[in-house]
């Protein structure tokens, strides 16, 4: 029945600020046809402003988008140089590394990189 994930909604209070963060700061691919969309690999993310639809804004919490990078430590250092603030130390599970941060609206994100095969 369900064959794929069409898009992930990213709630924002300022869509242009969010787009700048995802495209310019994180380096994600902007959609060539829609200013409020960007791509993570084959997954489209659509920035939307709930308050414009009469709904209260609330950031996405505890459902981190796990953004794959080949080297979590290097990516974290690069993003910190751009002003991104991370929460705590990079977590090393023995299989992967994760570094947690938020976008400007408080949506939970993480850098993720698996370095060992699953047991």
Image (tube, grey):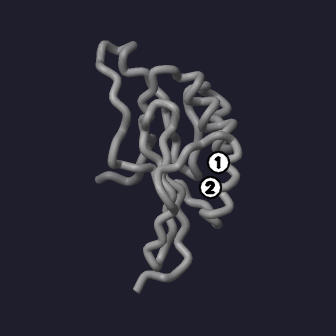
Instruction: Check the image and report above or below for 29 versus 98.
Output: above
Q: Residue at 32% x, 52% y: name it.
A: 2
Circle 1: is it few (<14), some (14-19), or many (20+) Cα within 10 Å? Answer: few
Q: Residue at 63% x, 28% y: name it.
A: 33
Q: Position of residue 7 (x, y in %)?
A: 45, 41
Q: Residue at 54% x, 56% y: name it.
A: 111
| Secondary structure state at the residue bearing disc 2 | helix
Residue toward you, 64 or 36? 64
| Secondary structure state at the residue bearing disc 1 | helix
Q: Residue at 50% x, 60% y: name it.
A: 89
Circle 2: is it few (<14), some (14-19), or many (20+) Cα within 10 Å? Answer: many
Residue toward you, 117 or 98? 98
Q: Quadrant of residue 58?
A: top left
Q: Position of residue 104 (x, y in %)?
A: 52, 32
Instruction: Check the image and report above or below for 112 versus 94.
Output: above
Q: Which residue is mark 1?
A: 80
Residue toward you, 40 or 112? 112
Q: Which residue is mark 2?
A: 76
Instruction: Check the image and report above or below for 92 versus 82.
Output: below
Circles 1 and 2 in contact, beta carbons < 8 Å: yes
Instruction: Check the image and report above or below for 12 versus 69.
Output: above
Report how far apart the C-alphas of labels 1 and 2 lie in the structure. 6 Å
- Outermost residue on the front side: it is 88
């Amino acid at each position: 029945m369900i064959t794929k994930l069409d898009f992930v909604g990213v709630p924002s209070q300022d869509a242009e600020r969010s787009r700048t963060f995802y495209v310019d700061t994180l380096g994600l691919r902007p959609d060539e046809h829609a200013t409020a969309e960007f791509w993570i690999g084959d997954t489209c993310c659509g920035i939307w402003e709930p308050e414009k639809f009469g709904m209260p804004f609330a950031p996405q919490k505890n459902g981190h988008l796990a953004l794959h990078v080949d080297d979590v430590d290097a990516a974290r250092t690069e993003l910190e140089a751009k002003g991104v603030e991370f929460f705590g130390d990079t977590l090393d599970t023995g299989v992967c590394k994760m570094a947690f941060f938020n976008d400007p609206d408080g949506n939970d994100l993480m850098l993720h990189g698996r370095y060992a095969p699953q047991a």
